[in-house]
Image: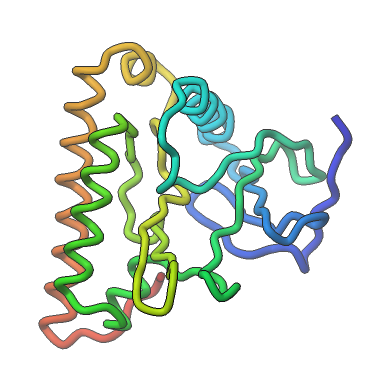
Amino acid sequence: MNTLKLQEKDFIAKGGERSCYLHPQDNTKLIKVVYTQTDSKEQNKLEHIYMNYLQKQNTDLSQVAKYYGEVNTNHGYGLVYEKIQDYDGQDTKSLRYYIWKQLIPRAIQIQLIHELKRYLSKNSILFVDTSLTNIFCKKIDADNYKLIIIDGLGAKRMGIKFWLYLHCKIYTKYKIFRQWQKFMQMYKKDTDKIDAGITHIRRF
């Protein structure tokens, strides 16, 4: 596998464990590389296993960023994903951005969130890192939106729990339910702040 050179101009954002770069040879794709020196070095490996598992199960991935596979880069081992864009070619914003900018009525937010919940449950997709910034709100036309998960799938670390996620449907269903409760707590926390008149947060 050839090494792909990532440059500073390709850098998009940094999360808690990984950096995200625009693919230097294809601006419709992104590359995630780990920058920390902790156990999180396994995050890309774990995510690769989980995405391959979903693909082999012929899972409906219509609300998950498309995964293209692995790549070697000058910053280490990376994963290649589609870059989510709106119908008009503009970069898609996170759900949290739309919530805090109040660009979508609260009732529509709830409708989209319920649709995502049904999708995850129906397809047994485990969304573990339930940050509002890990969900993008894609404009599919001038008046309609679709939520797309761009990060946080599978598990946070290797181990028996991850094995169970792949082999025990009952356990996976339970975990999906529990993580969704955490997501809704995060959503409520943000909307409560907005309703209280708070207008500034550090990260969209």
At 44% from the left and 39% from the top, the residue drawn is: 61
Residue 27 horizontal/vertical position (percent) = 73, 61
At 56% from the left and 71% from the top, the residue drawn is: 91
At 31% from the left and 32% from the top, the residue drawn is: 123
Q: Quadrant of residue 60?
A: top left
Q: What count of labels does the image hold?
A: 0
Q: Quadrant of residue 7?
A: bottom right
Q: Is residue 10 left or right of residue 98?
A: right
Residue 99 horizontal/vertical position (percent) = 28, 74
Residue 161 horizontal/vertical position (percent) = 32, 19
Quadrant where the image shows the N terminus: top right
At 27% from the left and 50% from the top, the residue drawn is: 116
Residue 195 drawn above or below residue 186: below
Residue 48 drawn above or below residue 95: above
Quadrant where the image shows the C terminus: bottom left
Question: What coloring was used for the rendering?
Answer: rainbow
Front position in the image: 77 or 80? 80
Q: Is residue 107 left or right of residue 166?
A: left
Residue 96 drawn above or below residue 135: below
Q: Is residue 180 left or right of residue 40?
A: left
Residue 193 drawn above or below residue 154: below
Residue 63 horizontal/vertical position (percent) = 40, 48
Q: Residue furthest right?
A: 2
Q: Quadrant of residue 170?
A: top left
